[in-house]
Amino acid sequence: MDTVEHLLATLTVQDLYKLALPAGAEIVGGVAGLVRLVSWVRVAQLDQASLERIEAGDLVLVAAPASGRPSRHATLAPFLTRLAELGAAGVATAGASPPGAGAIADAIGIPLIRLPAGVKLAQIEKQAIRLIINRRAEIEQRGVQIYRELAQQTIDNLGIEAIAEKLVELTGKLVVVEDPTPSLQLLAMPPISTVTREELQVSLRDPAEPSMWFDKGPMASTSPPVVMRQLNAPGWARYVAPIVVRGAIFGYLSLIGPADELDEIDRMAAGRGAAVCAIEMAKQMAIRQAESRIRSDFIDDLISGSLNSDAAIISRGQLLGYDLTKPHAVAVIELDTSEAYLDWLSKHNTHSVQELRQGFANVLNTALARRQPRAMMRIKGENAVFIWPSPAEGGLAAVRAAVDDLRQEVSRATPMMTASAAVGRLYARPSELSRAFREAEQALTIALRLYGGDRTTAFEELGVYRLLFHLHGTPELAGFQQETLSKLIGYDKEHEGELIKTLRAFFANHGNLSRTAEQLILHRNTVTYRLERIEELTGLDLENEDDRFRLQLALKLTEMV
């Protein structure tokens, strides 16, 4: 946990003027800057060497010029200007100030204080630094108390809402948590607050993108940067800090109140609150990831067929919050990618493949929770498997429609890419889900070969292709296809003919010559001539039922290549 030594002290120039400077000190100019916060006090000469040691937030005690040096009158004016540029909180000079110095201080907004002649600047420096250190110790002690009370909320598993409520209790300020967009996610208000959620949303709108709120560079979850941002409400502001988990911003926490009431304690509390929220989010993320792994392992066991006892499967599902006593189907959704495409992405942008997969997972997680929270899902790379419960009405058709809606949502959310899906049959016994998975996988593979991607296919829709899938690639089937169609394919190639096309249209129109001719935009006699040529080349009779089946089967085999 970071200390507050990196934060500005809560002591202002006005505070040190009253508490650390000697009696007789007088404010010469720059009254408007008395509210500046002081981080340190330094004794300096009116020379370049001293300027090089000055840091933002310093109260500079200026000694009289040494013998032989230029006079104070000649050097104080540019010295004041340069100190203002360096961000000094204020300047206190020993002895009289030169004429016009107060006007210069007023113009540049830096307080100028005249110290009584003969004072010891080293003694004033020590006293002022002691006040700053003591104040920092008080802030650090208060910070530890705030952190402990906030951390207790996550230790007790009370969630981010409890962290925000505790922060309201400790600071008396409004607390909001936004997502990375940023969009308001959580609001906690003091009991006496009358601000509405709608009013707050309007006031939180910031012209600058969140990435511009903080200095660029790595951010630590335990010590996030804190900045003040003005609200779209006169006189109101907020201290806002990023909630950083594993190096990424998961949201923002803000303490909100009147700008003149926000102090260093509030600033520190915002940072500590964001740090504790980061711990809570990391914890919840770890829990979700562990649960996801357990569910994924369970689904893998189900679809692999390694679980044979229905009672054991049902019991294990109940422990994960799923009811497997009712019929379920298995569905798969897969991005229409290829290994070559993924290799290209990896070579051209090392983050693209991971971003693609993460976006795929994010869309599915969000959409599934909305559409069917009772379904189980396992995601690996560009492929997702679902154990989908049968609805009360509609059966498999309703499951197919729901999966298709989910697939389309993935396609819409994935730029320049589509997704394909397939659904196996419904099974009453959970031990049969491995069979349902094989059906869904087969349906997806066959549909991609037959129709291409960007569609949803049910195993039941594939008809005879379900049988051909298991024979595809065997020598017997390849020989059958070659013997039946080789002469037609050769003829079309040699004569630029369309015998294969004509045969497909003939079967698609159930042997009706007129409809076939209409589909091909040909004369009926031309179709008759082509069919006769087909019979002549193949030696088969289109009037014979077995010969027609042989030709139809051979054509379907070509569609699976």
Image: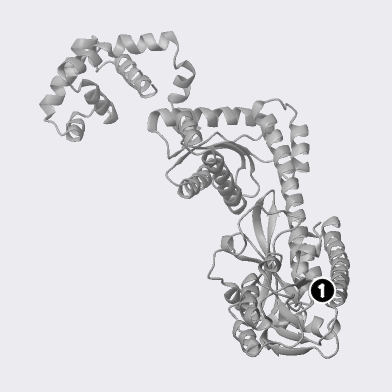
Quadrant housing residue 106: bottom right
Q: How many marks?
A: 1
Quadrant housing residue 554: top left
Q: Nearer the viewer, residue 2 or 476?
A: 2
Q: Is residue 323 visible?
A: no
Residue 128 picture location, percent across and down:
84, 76
Quadrant housing residue 447: top left
Residue 339 picture location, percent across and down:
48, 29
Q: Is residue 60 above or below residue 367?
A: below
Q: Amino acid at mark 1?
A: Glu
Q: Is residue 299 above or below residue 217?
A: above
Q: Residues within 10 Å of mark 1 (few under 14, many from 20)?
A: some
Q: Secondary structure at mark 1?
A: helix
Q: Nearer the viewer, residue 359 or 514?
A: 359
- On screen, residue 174 versus residue 425, left or right, reads right
Residue shown at the point (35%, 20%) measured from the top left: 558
Residue shown at the point (42%, 8%) measured from the top left: 476
Taking the view exactly as shown, the residue that stands out farthest to the front is 68
Residue 191 picture location, percent across and down:
78, 80
Q: Is residue 307 visible?
A: yes
Assign the C terminus to one quadrant of the image.
top left
- On screen, residue 80 versus residue 397, left or right, reads right
- On screen, residue 473 versus residue 514, left or right, reads right
Residue shown at the point (74%, 85%) measured from the top left: 113
Q: Which residue is mark 1?
A: 169
Q: Nearer the viewer, residue 276 or 522?
A: 276
